[in-house]
Image: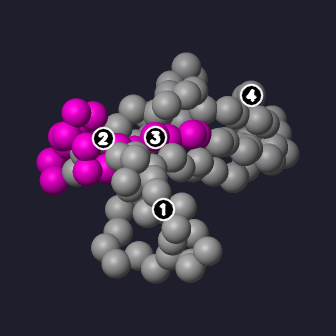
Amino acid sequence: QGHKCFNVWSPFVNGNDVPVAPFNGYALRQDAANGAVELAVNINGAVRWRVGEFVSGPYHLHVICPAYIPIGNKDHTGIVVGNAVKYLLSQPCSVNV
C-alpha cells in the first residue's frame, strides 16, 4: 500500500441454515423477539511497516467491532447494497496493535 493511502473494508456476514449450539438458541430467540441481534466481530492479524529499505517485524493486530443488527423490525432499516443490507456499527471499533 502506498504512502498516505488507506483501505476501507466492508465485509459481508451471511448464511442460511447456520447451526447454533443449543445453549445459545434460547438467547438468540429472545434477541429475535426483541428485534435485534448484537454481535462482536473480532479480527486478529499482523501488520508490518516499511520505511525505505527497512521493514519492521510483524506487530499483532486485534480489532473488536460491536455490531447491532436489527431483524424482523421494519423501523430499523439499513442501506441496501445489491442483494444485501449494510448496517452501521453501534459503537466505534477498538483497535490494538
Badge 3: few (under 14), some or many (20 or more) residues near its Cα, within 10 Å? Answer: some
Badge 1: few (under 14), some or many (20 or more) residues near its Cα, within 10 Å? Answer: some
Nearest to N terminus: mark 2 or mark 3: 3
Q: Are marks 2 and 3 in contact (CB under 8 Å)?
A: no
Instruction: Read off the residue under disc 1.
Output: 28
What distance separates the C-alpha of mark 4 from that of mark 1? 48 Å
Instruction: Read off the residue under disc 3.
Output: 68
Residue occupying image coordinates x 79% and y 47%: 60
Residue occupying image coordinates x 73% and y 29%: 52
**Quick one: 27 or 90, which is closer to the camera?**
27
SS class, disc 3: strand
Instruction: Name above or below for residue 62 compared with residue 33.
Output: above
Residue 6 location (% of width, % of height): 50, 28
Question: Disc number at residue 51?
Answer: 4
SS class, disc 1: helix
What distance separates the C-alpha of mark 2 from that of mark 3? 11 Å
29 relative position to 91: left or right: left
**Quick one: 1 or 23, which is closer to the camera?**
23
Question: Disc number at residue 92?
Answer: none
What distance separates the C-alpha of mark 3 from that of mark 1? 13 Å
* Quarter of the figure with the C terminus: top right
Q: Does residue 75 show up magenta in the picture?
A: yes
Please identify, in this view, whether the residue under mark 1 or under mark 2 is nearer the observer: 1
Nearest to N terminus: mark 3 or mark 1: 1
Q: Does residue 27 show up magenta in the picture?
A: no
The mark tally for this picture is 4
Location of residue 32 by image quarter: bottom left
| Numbered range of the magenta stretch | 65-83
50 relative position to 7: left or right: right
Question: Disc number at residue 86?
Answer: 2
